[in-house]
Image: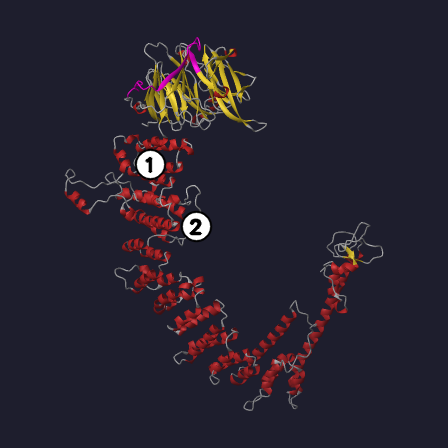
């Protein structure tokens, strides 16, 4: 049990004194005692007496000693005795300090006395029949001036009325409030500065003295009965006498006294007999369970932060409970006690009643509160963790140093206790809620999980051997199977273990685990802590904690190990970063020294990821692989050794890749791929495929490493190895191409050709050096004698196609490399000559060397169409002005631009001396393309003896071409006329799509009034002035056109026509 208070007997009536104590009032160092004889005794309480330590402290087991009588050293001294204070017993005392008044209840009247002289000031006659009263003082702001003032109120319960007197800043207000209730008032208690709780036989009511509103307190409707009989329970008052006659009235007409006490947080506890109800200050019931009292208390009270209950005098005990958990924390023996007096709180309820009084007929005890730190320490030592946390939550922050830290530490201690009881799931969940440092949690596990950080005692091999060969009853002392627990361990193993909060979870650790549905089997009962299946289950629980911690680390740490906010922002009060809960206490204790927060957090990240890896390998090996595919901070040495021993080579490769240890990964892959590794080689690791797949993932900046380890796959399987450079990936495309070409050239020129074709044809590389290098390689391959005819034909076709396609290779150099006497390169030479603009030489090769007249004609047709397309493209340029182009009857033929067909015709009819004239081909050319040839130069080539009949196809083609041009011109002129008519109509009448029936275009009318003005110069229009009207009906002075910002067409003859009409009309 907790020792929150120590009972100290401070006064006992003398044996010859026949009086009895009826009421108490304590304030400052004064103690006022009202007796049944009507006498008022005033005592002075002496502090720091030497006998405080001798005060008795009752315990819950009932075996505690009765508090001793006062010793010779007096705790109180009698200062004054008012024998004529009252003629009847003084039933209740209170004071209004601001008004310097002492209030007393005697002979059913309320009397006001002077607080110093105790002389009667006034007897309130209106309070005749008074049974109780209550006093309160509060700071209230004036609603009009917003100035705070002290307001004291005296509420008196007289029969069925509540009378309320109010003092405003020490002055009594003339108005006395009178509120009528339905029954006689048995108790009055202030809930706050303006609300009263009145207890009566029919029940309780909450009275707002400001608005005089009365609210009856009713029972809450249980959730189980909400749908069945909610209507029957909704109007039942709490504490009401049963109408069936079987209530309190049936037991000798005895009705228990209604009691109430205000708690912190705006709550009020109502009690009648053993029944209790928590309500708000507005009288609304709260969903809380009843206080588990075995007997109806004699009196209740609240001494911050505890709930007090004085048992009947025949029991003589005072119970101290936590008002939140309702747990009985302490029981103090006070024989015959019937009076409970908590010093009247002023201004605020917080911190009030730290020392309260309990009295019997002849004895008065003072309850001295122990320091909160001492109370918390005692609760923790007894493993009452929940009560310690609840007590901390009840206390204000100013009363406890580092309150959040204390709560967090107690939660951690509770989690450790649960962990040592093999309740791993709730323990790890609590570690997560408490944001425990991962180092502290991991250290609870054996070395197989925690490594060097483990505090778990391991059994030595010698001890194990001895245990196996000896009986369990031998003298050999086995090593402990659980971690050393220190004070917590001693308390856990003691006979009071059942009293701890951790003992509330009594079921086996596996039964209430979250992952019970996926568990293979529960651990055997014979498993020692953290061994066998027990260890596996604990590790599964640890994985969830580490995963949550890993997410917290990632919020502050980048994948490269740097802080996301560097330097981190520190708390102004504690000087710690936001992630301080992840760091061990040893690091946080270095606040006086500079701390490398990045280094410390990185160390924690490495610890968490490495431990998570060990946990996965032990409990769920399938999850180890996905961990490596994420950014992680695992210790490479630990992971490599574990994976290699477990023959998990694929996971090891993924881990090395994630850690950017590419050389180690590639060396391992090379050994497996080449078959040089020891032991059995996995099927997926054989051959170069796995190495190629790894190389394709590497970034281009590691080109040296890529080329180093790509050599053996390219040599062994070129079709597989070349995929490193030819894959459709960003990495392959961004590799330095000159280095790759040099690398491939050392292996095979064909691989260079394959790579060059890839980067030029598929990637569109326009580097002239690469184009020239590909041509050189083609020529080199064609010159080799070992090349078969089929391959030579393919290479020849590729070379000629590339020479036609490429525009950036070096033409002169290429032409010099082409042999003039080798038939294989004849067409290639013609293509290069064409690219150089030497059409006559190119056509000479087609006509005289290749004797392919169809290709020669095709060549001429291609050049002619390209020339015409170039002219048309020039005419279509939007930003250039050209003269009007008309189709001409006579093709051009000048020195600067020779007609390509005339060149071919000249080669046919005027060949070199060693060649013959080719009349059939010449006549065929004239028949097909005569219209494209200039007539004068063409006819000059014809001999005089040539029959005209041979040229009929030529003349027929010329006539058809001239007729076509004339008819085309007629059609164009007709279309231009139609378009011009449409434009003129639009200009005069407006667009056809305008739905307005009013005239538009130039026929529209624009009205100009006296108030209209020019939008440019802002001057009014004159009657005889020239104006300009735009299509949107905007009117300006004609002279302001240049300043209007609108585009106009220059007034010149060359600009007139359709374009001028379009600009001036405003419709295009």
Badge 2 density bin: few <14, some 14–19, many ≥20, Cα 10 Å: few
Residue 893 is covered by the magenta coloring: no
- Secondary structure under badge 1? helix
The one nearer the camera, 880 or 925, is: 880
Residue 89 is covered by the magenta coloring: yes
Asked if residue 510 shows in the view, the reply is no
- Secondary structure under badge 2? loop
The answer to whether 897 is drawn above or below residue 155 in the figure is below
Q: Is residue 661 left or right of residue 1043?
A: left
Q: Predominant secondary structure in magenta?
A: loop
The one nearer the camera, 182 or 904, is: 182
Circles 2, 1 touching at the beta carbon (< 8 Å): no
Asked if residue 962 shows in the view, the reply is yes
Mark 2 or 1, nearer chain start: 1
The figure's colour scheme reads secondary structure
Q: Which residue is mark 1?
A: 414
Q: Which residue is mark 2?
A: 567
Residue 987: horizontal and vertical position, in percent? 77, 60
How far is mark 2 from mark 1, CA to CA? 35 Å
The answer to whether 798 is drawn above or below residue 292 in the figure is below
Badge 1 density bin: few <14, some 14–19, many ≥20, Cα 10 Å: many
In the picture, the quarter occupied by the N terminus is top left
Q: Quadrant of residue 76?
A: top left
Residue 564: horizontal and vertical position, in percent? 44, 51
Q: Looking at the rendered structure, which numbered label has been put on residue 645?
A: none
In the picture, the quarter occupied by the C terminus is bottom right
Residue 647: horizontal and vertical position, in percent? 29, 55
* View extreme (right): residue: 1024
Residue at 24 percent of width and 43 percent of height: 457
Q: Which residues, given as a range, are shown in magenta?
A: 65-92
């Amino acid at each position: 049990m907790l020792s929150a208070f120590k009972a100290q007997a401070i006064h006992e009536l003398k044996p010859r004194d026949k009086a009895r104590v009826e009421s108490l009032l304590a304030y400052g160092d004064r103690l006022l005692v009202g007796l049944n004889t009507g006498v008022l005794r005033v005592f002075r309480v002496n502090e720091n007496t030497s006998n405080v330590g001798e005060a008795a402290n009752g315990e819950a087991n009932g075996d505690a000693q009765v508090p001793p009588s006062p010793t010779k050293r007096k705790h109180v001294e009698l200062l004054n005795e008012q024998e004529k204070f009252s003629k009847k017993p003084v039933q209740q005392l209170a004071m209004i300090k601001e008004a310097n008044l002492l209030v007393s209840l005697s002979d059913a009247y309320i009397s006001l006395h002077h607080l110093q002289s105790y002389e009667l000031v006034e007897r309130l006659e209106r309070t005749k029949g008074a049974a109780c009263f209550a006093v309160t003082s509060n700071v209230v702001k004036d609603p009009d001036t917003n100035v705070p003032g002290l307001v004291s109120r005296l509420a008196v319960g007289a029969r069925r009325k509540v009378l309320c007197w109010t003092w405003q800043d020490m002055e009594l207000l003339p108005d006395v409030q009178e509120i009528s209730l339905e029954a006689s008032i048995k108790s009055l208690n202030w809930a706050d500065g303006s609300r009263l709780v009145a207890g009566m036989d029919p029940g309780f009511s909450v009275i707002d003295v400001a608005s005089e509103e009365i609210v009856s307190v009713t029972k809450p409707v249980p959730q189980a009965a909400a749908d069945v009989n909610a209507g029957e329970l909704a109007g039942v008052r709490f504490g009401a006498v049963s109408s069936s006659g079987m209530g309190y009235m049936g037991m000798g007409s005895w009705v228990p006294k209604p009691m109430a006490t205000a708690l912190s947080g705006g709550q009020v506890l109502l009690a009648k007999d053993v029944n209790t109800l928590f309500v708000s200050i507005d009288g609304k019931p709260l969903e809380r369970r009843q206080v588990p009292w075995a007997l109806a208390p004699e009196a209740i009270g609240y001494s911050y932060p505890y709930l007090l209950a004085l048992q009947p005098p025949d029991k003589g005990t005072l119970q101290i409970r936590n008002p939140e958990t309702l747990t009985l924390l302490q029981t103090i023996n006070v024989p015959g006690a019937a009076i409970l007096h908590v010093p009247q709180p002023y201004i605020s309820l917080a911190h009030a009643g730290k020392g309260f009084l309990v009295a019997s007929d002849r004895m008065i005890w003072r309850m001295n509160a122990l320091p909160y730190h001492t109370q918390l320490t005692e609760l923790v030592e007894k493993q009452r963790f929940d009560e310690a946390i609840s007590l901390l939550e009840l206390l204000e922050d100013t009363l406890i140093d580092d309150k959040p830290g204390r709560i967090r530490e107690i939660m951690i201690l509770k989690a450790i206790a649960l962990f040592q009881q093999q309740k791993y799931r709730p323990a790890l969940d609590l570690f997560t809620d408490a944001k425990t440092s991962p180092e502290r949690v991991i250290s609870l596990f054996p070395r197989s999980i925690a490594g060097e950080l483990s505090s778990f005692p391991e059994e030595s091999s010698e001890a194990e051997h001895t245990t196996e060969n000896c009986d369990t009853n031998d003298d050999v002392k086995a090593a402990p199977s659980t971690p050393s627990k220190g004070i917590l361990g001693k308390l856990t193993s003691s006979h009071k273990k059942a009293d701890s909060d951790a003992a509330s979870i009594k079921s086996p650790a596996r039964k209430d685990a979250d992952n019970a549905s996926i568990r293979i089997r529960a651990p055997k009962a014979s498993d020692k802590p953290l061994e066998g299946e027990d260890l596996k289950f604990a590790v599964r629980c640890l994985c969830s904690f580490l995963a949550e911690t890993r997410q917290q680390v990632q919020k502050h740490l980048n994948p490269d190990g740097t802080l996301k906010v560097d330097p981190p922002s520190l708390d102004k009060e504690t000087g710690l970063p936001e992630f301080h809960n992840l760091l061990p206490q040893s690091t946080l204790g270095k606040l006086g020294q500079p701390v490398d927060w990045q280094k410390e957090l990185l160390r924690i990240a490495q610890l968490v990821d490495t431990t998570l890896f060990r946990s996965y390998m032990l409990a769920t090996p399938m999850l180890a692989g996905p961990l490596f595919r994420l950014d992680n901070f695992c210790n490479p040495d630990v992971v490599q050794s574990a994976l290699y021993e477990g023959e998990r080579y694929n996971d090891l490769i993924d881990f090395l890749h994630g850690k950017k240890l590419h050389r180690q990964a590639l060396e391992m892959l090379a050994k497996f791929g080449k078959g040089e590794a020891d032991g059995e080689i996995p099927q997926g690791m054989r051959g170069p495929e796995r190495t190629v797949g790894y190389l394709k993932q590497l970034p281009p900046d590691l080109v040296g490493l890529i080329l180093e380890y790509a050599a053996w796959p390219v040599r062994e399987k070129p079709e597989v190895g070349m995929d490193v450079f030819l894959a459709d990936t960003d990495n392959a495309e961004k590799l330095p191409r000159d280095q790759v070409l040099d690398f491939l050239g050392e292996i095979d020129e064909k691989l260079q050709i394959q790579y060059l074709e890839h980067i030029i044809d598929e990637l569109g590389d326009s580097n002239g050096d690469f184009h020239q290098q590909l041509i050189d390689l083609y020529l080199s391959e064609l010159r080799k004698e070992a090349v078969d005819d089929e391959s030579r034909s393919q290479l020849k076709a590729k070379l000629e196609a590339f020479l036609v396609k490429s525009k950036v290779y070096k033409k002169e150099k290429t032409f010099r490399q082409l042999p003039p006497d080798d038939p294989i390169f004849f067409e290639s030479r013609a293509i290069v000559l064409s690219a150089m603009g030497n059409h006559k030489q190119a056509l000479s090769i087609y006509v005289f060397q290749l004797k392919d007249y169809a290709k020669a004609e095709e060549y001429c047709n291609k050049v002619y169409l390209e020339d015409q397309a170039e002219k048309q493209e020039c005419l279509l340029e939007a930003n250039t002005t050209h003269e009007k182009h008309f189709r001409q009857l006579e093709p051009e033929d000048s020195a600067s631009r020779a007609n390509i067909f005339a060149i071919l015709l000249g080669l046919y009819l005027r060949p070199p001396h060693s060649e013959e004239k080719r009349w059939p081909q010449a006549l065929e050319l004239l028949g097909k393309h005569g219209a494209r040839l200039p007539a004068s130069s063409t006819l000059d080539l014809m001999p005089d003896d040539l029959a005209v009949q041979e040229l009929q196809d030529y003349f027929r083609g010329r006539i058809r071409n001239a007729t076509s041009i004339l008819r085309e011109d007629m059609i164009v002129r007709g279309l231009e006329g139609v378009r011009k008519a449409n434009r003129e109509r639009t200009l005069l009448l407006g667009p056809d799509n305008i739905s307005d029936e009013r005239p538009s275009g130039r026929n529209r009318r624009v009205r100009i009034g006296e108030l209209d003005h020019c939008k440019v110069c802002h001057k009014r229009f004159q009657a005889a002035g020239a104006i300009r009207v735009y299509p949107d009906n905007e009117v300006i002075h004609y002279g302001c056109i240049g300043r209007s910002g609108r585009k106009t067409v220059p007034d010149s003859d060359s600009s007139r026509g359709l374009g001028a009409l379009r600009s001036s009309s405003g419709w295009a």
